[in-house]
Image (cartoon, grey):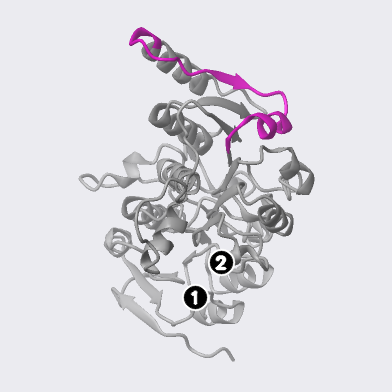
């Protein structure tokens, strides 16, 4: 028998039992569930990643829905347990769901929610921050100061890369990749080269218009180019930011061979998925090319880094915080809660999961809909779509 898990309870007499495997930012998500007669139980176990056994204990004999985290292994075992407890709803507090076996969830009739549309600008901002931190060697310089090593200005002290007039490369020009590109083009007057299977027309028009604005004001206009291959981006760009999805075709997309294509003083940024980069090859490349720099928010085997990466001064590493702005994290919690609530209440699915503003407006009630259900179509008659 599974051991009981520590919990915090809101609205103990609520009709519907909803579990959150972690405490989440803000209280609006709790209020929205309580207002709809939900008993909300939040796991308070002092454990970074819950095991399958921990979550089974949380689910218990009766559970209507669960809000989980991307660090948890949501497969056949957990969806079977949730289904036996009467649960029909699960939502990741994340846009990604690589940790979720969607087919298993569908088999047990469980809706799987995620939280797109709220992370775009926040993630792009962190990618831009890592680009600047790596280019100007900010983390190295900060450590130098804190160690008491600064004795006065020197001509060669922490000389980095100027971004203005250089070329930024984007691999994957979707919402986040395009937002990042706009920030770098407008913020630092960088030229753009991008690779995507689909033409980023809006991004191209933005860069063209900004280039015309600069020219009209007597400045050098910025330019854009859609590359015919990813390799072309790697060879030509001074700063490259990765924004692809993670699947079999993008695993180790950046490997030893492709790292060798890049400029010796290039900067590589990854805020997408860790396994997109061959981390062992990256460590070797950083060691052999001290002027090459990298900014990483995600890692191949999170929460671990490959041996040697932490020792690389030309690497800026942060612990998966791309979505860690207050507004975004509170929004993610709200969307995840509304996914679960919507399924419990029999609401339809919102037609455009990237248009989430109506759900996040605190001055009005959210729409009676599930913001984003990734397996709505396979579940068939369980859902209608709200257009």
Q: Residue 25's quadrant in the figure?
A: bottom left
Task: Work out which residue is located at the far top of the displayed protein and give it.
Answer: 216
Task: Work out which residue is located at the far left of the displayed protein and give it.
Answer: 363
| Residue 387 visible within the image | no
- The magenta stretch spans which residues? 215-239
Verify CB contact (< 8 Å) between mark 2 and mark 1. Answer: yes
Residue nearest the observer in this picture, 241 or 15? 241
Q: Is residue 360 left or right of residue 112?
A: left
Residue nearest the observer in this picture, 271 or 358? 271
Q: At numbered mark 1, what does the secondary structure look like: helix, strand or loop?
A: loop
Residue at (48% x, 25% y) in the render: 165
Residue at (74% x, 38% y) in the render: 261
Residue at (49% x, 75% y) in the render: 48
The residue carrying mark 2 is 71
Residue at (73% x, 33% y) in the render: 231
Instruction: Name the quadrant of the N terminus.
Output: bottom right
| Residue 39 visible within the image | yes
- The location of residue 155, given as percent across then percent down, is 43, 45
Q: Earlier in the sequence, mark 2 or mark 1?
A: 1
Up the image or down, 170 lies above or below 160; here it is above
Residue nearest the observer in this picture, 58 or 171? 171
Query: Callout 1: few (<14), some (14-19), or many (20+) C-alpha neighbours within 10 Å?
Result: few
The residue carrying mark 1 is 48
Query: Callout 2: few (<14), some (14-19), or many (20+) C-alpha neighbours within 10 Å?
Result: some
- Mark 2–mark 1 Cα distance, whole angstroms, equals 9 Å
């Amino acid at each position: 028998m599974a051991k009981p898990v520590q919990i915090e309870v809101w609205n103990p007499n609520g009709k519907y039992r909803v579990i959150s495997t972690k405490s989440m930012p803000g209280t609006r998500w709790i209020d929205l569930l309580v207002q709809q007669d939900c008993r909300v139980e939040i796991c308070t176990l002092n454990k970074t990643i819950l095991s399958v056994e921990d979550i089974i204990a949380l689910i218990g004999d009766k559970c209507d829905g669960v809000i989980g985290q991307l660090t948890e292994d949501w497969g056949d075992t957990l969806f079977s347990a949730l289904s036996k407890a009467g649960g029909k709803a699960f939502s990741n507090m994340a846009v990604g769901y690589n940790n979720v076996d969607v087919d298993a969830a569908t088999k047990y009739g469980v809706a799987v929610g995620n939280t797109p549309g709220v992370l775009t600008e926040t993630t792009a901002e962190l990618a831009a921050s890592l680009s600047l931190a790596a280019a100007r060697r900010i983390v190295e310089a900060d450590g130098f100061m804190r160690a008491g090593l600064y004795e006065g200005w020197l001509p060669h002290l922490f000389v980095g890369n100027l971004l203005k007039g250089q070329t930024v490369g984007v691999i994957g020009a979707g919402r986040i990749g395009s937002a990042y590109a706009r920030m770098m083009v407008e913020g630092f007057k960088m030229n753009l080269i991008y690779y995507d299977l689909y033409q980023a027309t809006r991004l191209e028009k933005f860069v063209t218009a900004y280039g015309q604005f600069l020219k009209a004001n007597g400045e050098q206009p910025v330019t854009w180019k859609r590359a015919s291959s990813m390799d072309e981006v790697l060879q030509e760009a001074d700063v490259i930011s990765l924004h692809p999805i993670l699947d079999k075709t993008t695993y180790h997309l950046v490997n030893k061979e492709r790292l060798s294509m890049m400029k010796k003083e290039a900067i590589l940024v990854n805020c997408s998925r860790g396994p997109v980069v061959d981390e062992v090859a990256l460590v070797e490349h950083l060691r052999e090319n001290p002027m090459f720099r990298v900014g990483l928010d995600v890692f191949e085997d999170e929460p671990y880094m490959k041996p040697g990466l932490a020792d690389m001064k030309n690497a800026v590493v942060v612990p998966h915080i791309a979505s860690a702005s207050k507004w975004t994290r509170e929004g993610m919690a709200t969307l995840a809660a509304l996914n679960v609530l919507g399924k419990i209440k029999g609401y339809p699915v919102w037609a455009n999961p990237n248009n989430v503003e109506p759900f996040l407006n605190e001055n009005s009630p959210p729409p009676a809909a599930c913001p984003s259900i990734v397996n709505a179509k396979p579940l068939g008659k369980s859902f209608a779509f709200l257009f």
